[in-house]
Image: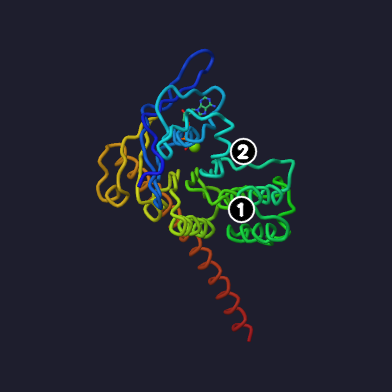
């Protein structure tokens, strides 16, 4: 069942009195308990499509047409005040740049506690306990003490995880995750993706996962929408997409990923070769020392 439908969304920017269209008739829908991966190259319009859902677009941007249907109602008709209730409460966002949702003037813990108070109605020790658990769930070490840190005391990856913890603390019906794991190493990335999948399964959350990582898509998404130059060029069941992408751009996109994988494998091979050389040199040196030692004796 669709919980959210983006229909014929058009958006553009006014730059020095000129209007530049960035989104052209964008259509996609989110299903209960499923992940839709929105993929495409940098600048194709993924973030703008996501931000339009929450009406969080830049001042220079304007939505010139289309609808965002949530429970049959068009969110684009809502006032900012009405939208502020929906944001976080019904639709949570993990933004591409975590600093946009962390206030540098408050500790990260205070900001997380505020979300827990607002959305779960918890106070005092109970709220504190939930906050520690939320930090532990996103693998922030020394969670209890880290709650007292200000955002500038967190690394990029920790800020990203703190923002994920805040989004997950809302129990929203829809979760928009814009490149949620880009600043994280692979093991933490896998744990975060497991966390998102658990939430999807247990709460029947609908997830919009924006990524350029097709490996993440193949492991976590049921549906995929491919964007190119402001347009959705293909939306398909993820399994079908990996077997047989329809649109030439989708194919090209897959080829690009394969190429980067080959490059990665090539550099890994070179690295391993260097490592082997180092090991051989080390062994030769040891053999030399050993021979010298034996010769002396
Ligand atoms: N504030 C802005 N003013 C003018 N143009 C903008 C602004 N923000 C985005 N754009 C333009 O809108 C288009 C879509 O941008 P968007 O951020 O949605 O891309 P994206 O697909 O999320 O890229 P990335 O993968 O790099 O995050 C781009 O051409 C971009 O240059
Ligand atoms: Mg983006």
- Give the CA distance from mark 2 to mark 1: 23 Å
Residue drawn 54% across the image and 55% down it: 185
Vertical placement of 190 versus 24: above or below? below
Q: Which mark is residue 76?
A: none
Percent x, y of residue 280: 50, 68
- Judged left or right of residue 249, residue 119 is right
Mark 2 or mark 1: whose residue is earlier in sequence: 2
- Judged left or right of residue 230, residue 161 is right
Element on which disc 1 rests: helix
Residue drawn 40% across the image and 41% down it: 39
Colour setup of the view = rainbow
Q: Nearer the viewer, residue 295 or 154?
A: 154
- Judged left or right of residue 155, residue 54 is left
Q: Nearer the viewer, residue 143 or 32?
A: 32
Q: Which mark is residue 100?
A: 2
Percent x, y of residue 105: 74, 41
Residue 195 can be seen in this image: yes
Q: Which residue is mark 1?
A: 120
Percent x, y of residue 131: 66, 57
Percent x, y of residue 84: 58, 36
Quarter of the image containing the C terminus?
bottom right
Whether label 1 lies within 8 Å of ligand 2 gets the answer no
Vertical placement of 49 versus 116: above or below? above
Q: Nearer the viewer, residue 13 or 10?
A: 10
In the displayed orientation, state which residue is furthest to the top: 17
How many other residues sit within 10 Å of disc 2, few (<14), some (14-19) or many (≥20)? few
How many other residues sit within 10 Å of disc 1, few (<14), some (14-19) or many (≥20)? some
Element on which disc 2 rests: helix
């Amino acid at each position: 069942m669709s919980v959210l439908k983006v229909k014929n969304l058009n958006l553009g920017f006014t730059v020095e009195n000129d209007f530049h269209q960035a989104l052209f008739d964008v259509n996609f829908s989110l299903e209960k308990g499923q992940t839709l991966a929105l993929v495409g190259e940098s600048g194709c319009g993924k973030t703008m499509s996501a931000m339009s859902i929450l009406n969080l677009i830049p001042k220079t941007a304007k939505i010139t047409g289309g609808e965002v249907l949530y429970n049959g109602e068009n969110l684009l008709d809502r006032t900012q005040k009405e939208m502020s209730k929906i944001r976080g409460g019904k639709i949570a966002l993990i933004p591409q740049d975590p600093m946009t949702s962390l206030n540098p003037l408050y500790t990260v813990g205070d900001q997380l506690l505020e979300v827990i108070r607002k959305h779960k109605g918890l106070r005092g020790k109970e709220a504190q306990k939930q906050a520690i658990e939320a930090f532990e769930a996103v693998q922030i070490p020394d969670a209890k003490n880290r709650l007292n840190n200000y955002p500038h005391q967190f690394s990029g990856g920790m800020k990203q995880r703190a923002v994920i913890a805040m989004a997950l603390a809302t129990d929203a019906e829809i979760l928009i995750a814009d490149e949620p794991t880009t600043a994280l190493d692979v093991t933490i990335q896998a744990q975060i993706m497991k966390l998102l999948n658990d939430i999807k399964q247990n709460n029947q959350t609908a997830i919009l996962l924006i990524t350029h990582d097709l490996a993440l898509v193949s492991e976590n998404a049921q549906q995929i929408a491919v964007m190119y130059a402001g347009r959705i060029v293909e939306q398909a069941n993820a399994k079908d997409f990996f077997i047989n992408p329809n649109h030439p751009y989708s194919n090209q996109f897959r080829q690009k990923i394969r190429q980067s994988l080959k490059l990665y494998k090539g550099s890994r091979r070179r690295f391993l070769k260097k490592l082997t050389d180092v090991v051989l040199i080390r062994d030769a040196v040891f053999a030399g020392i050993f021979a010298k030692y034996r010769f002396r004796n």
